[in-house]
Amino acid sequence: MRLSRDKRYAAAGNNSNDAAAPPSAKSIAKMTHDRVVTMQGLEGIRIAELGHLVSAAYATKIMADLGADVVKVEEPTGDVARTRGPFPGGIADPEKSGLFLYLNTNKRGVTLDLTDPRERPQLERIAEWAEIVVHNYAPKEMAARGLDYERLRAINPRLVLCSITPFGLTGPHRDYRAEEITMAHGGGWAWVAPGASDRPDLPPLKAFGHQCDFHAGMSAAVASLGAYFRALASGRGEHVDLSVQAHVASFIEQNLVYFTYCEKVASRLGQRLLFPWGIFECADGLIFLVIVEDDQWRRLVELMGNPEWASWEIFRGLVGRADNADVMKPYIREWTRQWKVADLFRAGQERRVCFAPVFTMAALADEAQLRARGFFVEVDHPRSEALRLPGPPYRLHDPWWRIRRPAPRLGEHNREMLASRPNGASAAQSSAPGPRAEQPLPLAGVRVVDFSWVWAGPFCAMQLAHLGAEVIRLESQARPDAARRLPITPAGMEPGLNRSGYFNQWNQGKQSALLNLAAPGAIEIARRLIAKSDVVVENFATGVMERLGLSYEDLRQVKPDIIMVSISGYGHTGPQRSYMGYGPAIVPLSGLASLTGYPGGPPAEVGISYGDPTGGITAAAGVLAALVVRRRTGRGQHIDLALWEATAALVAEGWMEFLMSGRLPERIGNRDPLLSPCNCFRASGEDAWVTIACATDREWQALCGVIGRTELASDPRFAAAADRKANEDALEAEITAWTQTRDRWEITRALQAAGVAAFPSMSSRDLVEDPHLNERGFFTRLEHAEVGVRAHAGVPWRFAETTNGVRSPAPLIGEHTDRVMRELLGMPAEEIARLRAEKVLY
């Protein structure tokens, strides 16, 4: 197997065979500029990917597009993504599947049958060569292919192995079968979608495409790069056990804490906590509107011409408008119908009111903001016409991201890479694995200054805290985080800035220091803190950090190797850079809303402010890559992340369908474009639902046996996948007749025992009480000074070599001010007291 061994520390002159720690910052500083910049991004990092479809492929695509050398190992029949399409002209061709071509840019490809013991030595050679291996085989499939961490660790002690599985490698559900629909419902996301629905007869709704798997891929990239960052210094690898269910449950917004704090179960039915919020008709299309603050409501009222009804007492305050949404909604609808979408979008944004068009794929192709930021990129392929693919999910000051090669053809690099053993000795050959001893968390010693608030930025910073970074939130009582003010307070307890479940969920593991940035001298204090830090996270409106004197260029003067991530709705460049872009507005803006919805129904929301966790986890992946690069080269980075682009990158299935066929994908609810049956079925009990999906004929036949209808397996209407798809309504009627009289867990256990993917649609209560998630230690139950012990979503991955779990509850506002000022900045007590009195530390 001829896998070239690039010099991992080329900039520093270290050979990758050395097991020593990477060069220190001091030694790097002495290098010439030319040598430092010879290594671009993740260039030279060796990664192997195994498995099918989306999660593993997207995790490694993130790293490949930043320069890593990724070898994709496919089975002889190829990745299942090659069969998913979409295909040009609708003609199936494994070399022209749109999903595969998007997911696998910048990779080399080989084929191996790892179920054949004669080919198993090739896996050992891959483990010998690679520094990171990412796969998404289920636990039983791992065993059949020799993907055993202990064995691979013996071959290569530095190896980071990331196992992405539906439910994780431990727990009672570890061997349950799953498809995308299983994860969407099993992780609690679909239960709250589409949101504010008045149709209890319709099931909870899955978002379009493989959103759960895309997200799991980003989480895998974050955890894997974190483990690799530590391995660069320690020479010891890690096993990342990532549960897709847990990751989905980790980003369902306020819904979990709404139960653990307020003792209420959020659902897709009923009203929202905020209003106006939703999709409204215009004269020529649809537009989304969300109002988060009272001042935004006042500006909307002015834009509407100050109608008399807007002054009614029932609409006063956030709570009043939410409680009376049904009364207000007709007035908003009547007004929006008088506008064209483009005119209302522009007029609202000019007044800092968050409007967003409900874009289709066709509309995205012509959007000026995306064009100005170069979001779409042209990629040539030897078996396909040039493709215009979704491009970078962020803009980088040092432009590491680029497409260097198209997706590989099946087995394209077999001759090049499998002809002989790797040249040269590997790190594993020169050092055996040492005795097992607990390692520090991957980002131990990394300090993060967190200026962000609400969700996207805090979600990014929380991932860094989960990995062991010291995250210091800078916040002020002059304008507290809106998340601290949301009325999600323990039942029977008065609201307070330290009692919001929303804030306490997204700020676990962090510290809080008060700093009123509007006060004289505050910016200098911020600069001093940044000079002693590694990463800055901010999601202020575009231009705020520049006006404060805290832009990336300003901070480079303070700390030349600083890594800064700026999260905004539209990005920091382009004609719409100043537009407001809250997380829920990104769903329609990205085209996801136009693709999501019940068959025959209108575009739908996805139940959560999806742009926020998507932007947050994407930003975290960028930060981890930047930390790895800084450890190798000594250089910092600025990550300009637009929620719009980060989310649009995950809607690639819809984009590729439009690109290759010229058609807009239909809204199909919980169904799958190919699999049938695949839906969410009513079970016995009030609002009880269960998902069932058959990916193969064998699974369909097993389903028929379980429900006692073996004759259906030979029914010509359902004999093959295409037949079942053509007769889907009739097929689902047969299944519903069986499910609606049975308990959802009874259905799940019976079908899973037969090898069929089945799982209930889970509410927040279901998740918190789930024995599987609790056995894996997913929920955090730490003592908080004001709200006591409450369950929060925890870390979705588990490490083999270090302590797992959240280290501390969310901080009280300003809880760590004295410690930060005294210990980090060396301020005497008298100065701290003076700054408090002057409302600088306020």
Image (tube, rainbow, N blue to C red):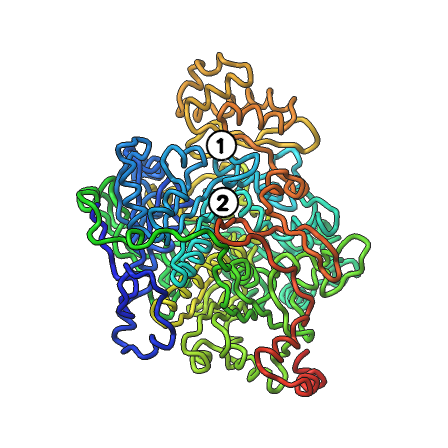
Residue 308 higher or lower than 826, as above or below? above
Quarter of image, res 119: top left
Front one among 727 and 208: 208
In the orientation shown, which residue stands out farthest toward the top?
711
Residue 481 higher or lower than 216, as above or below? below
Q: Measured from the top left, where is residue 573 in percent x and y? A: 42, 69
Q: What number is the disc on residue 177? A: 1
Q: Amino acid at mark 1?
A: Arg
Q: Measured from the top left, where is residue 322 in percent x and y? A: 72, 54
Question: Mark 2 or mark 1: which is in front?
Answer: 1
Q: Earlier in the sequence, mark 2 or mark 1?
A: 1
Residue 214 higher or lower than 562, as above or below? above
Front one among 561 and 550: 561
Rendered-image quadrant of the N terminus: top left
Residue at 40% in and 45% down: 56
Quarter of image, res 604: top right
In the orientation shown, which residue stands out farthest toward the front?
435
According to the picture, the residue beneath numbered tag 2 turns out to be 212
Q: Amino acid at mark 2?
A: Cys
Front one among 543 and 405: 405
Residue at 26% in and 69% down: 13
Q: Secondary structure at mark 1?
A: loop
Q: Secondary structure at mark 2?
A: helix
Q: Measured from the top left, where is residue 687 in percent x and y? A: 67, 33
Q: Crowdedness of circle 2 by 10 Å Cα count: few (<14), some, many (20+)? A: many
Residue at 57% in and 23% down: 750
